[in-house]
Image (spheres, helix red, strand yellow):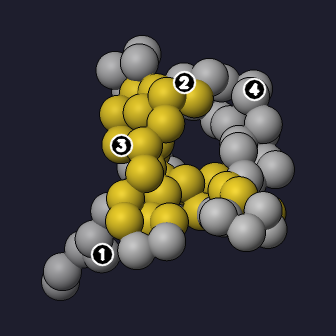
């Protein structure tokens, strides 16, 4: 039986960041990176016309060395 692929931890603009570390978001056709702090509000993206958008951030690396994947259910 194949186990499912691991799922990375993500967050949406306006949510509280769950882990300090390096995050990425696919914005306007390219990957953008941000160093976010735990408990920080995850940032929105403002386009060239000044319109604010929610984005989904994906955790790439945690500063505490922990896993970047959603824990598997037992």
Q: Residues within 10 Å of mark 2 (few under 14, many from 20)?
A: some
Real-space CA distance between mark 4 and mark 2, rounded to the nearest whole angstrom: 8 Å
Residue 65 occupies which quadrant of the picture? Answer: top left
Q: Specify few, some or many for label 3: CA neighbours under 10 Å numbering under 14, 14-19, or 20 or more.
A: some
Residue linked to disc 1: 4
29 or 63, nearer to the observer: 29
| Circle 4 crowding by C-alpha within 10 Å: few under 14, some 14–19, many from 20 | few
Between residues 20 and 1, which one lies in front from this camera angle? 20
Question: Residue 15: percent from the left, percent from the top?
Answer: 79, 48
**Quadrant hosting residue 45:** bottom right
Residue 45 versus residue 8: which sits nearer the camera? 45
Asked if one can make out residue 72 in the rendered structure from this viewpoint, the answer is: no
Looking at the rendered structure, the secondary structure element under dot 1 is: loop
Q: Which residue is mark 4?
A: 39
**Residue behind mark 3:** 60
Outermost residue toward the front in this view: 49
> Depth check: 53 or 59 in front?
53
44 to the left or right of 68: right
Marked residue nearer the N-terminal end (4 or 2): 2
Which of pointers 3 and 1 lies earlier in the amino acid sequence?
A: 1
Specify the farthest residue to the top. 64
**Residue 33: image x %, image y %?**
42, 43
Q: Of helix, strand and loop, which one carries label 4?
A: loop
């Amino acid at each position: 039986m194949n186990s499912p692929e691991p799922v990375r931890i993500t967050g949406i603009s306006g949510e509280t960041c769950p882990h300090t570390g390096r995050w990425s978001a696919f914005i306007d056709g390219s990957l953008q990176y941000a160093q976010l702090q735990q408990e920080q509000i995850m940032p929105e993206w403002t386009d060239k016309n000044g319109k604010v958008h929610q984005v989904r951030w994906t955790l790439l690396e945690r500063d505490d060395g922990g896993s970047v994947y959603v824990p598997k259910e037992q």
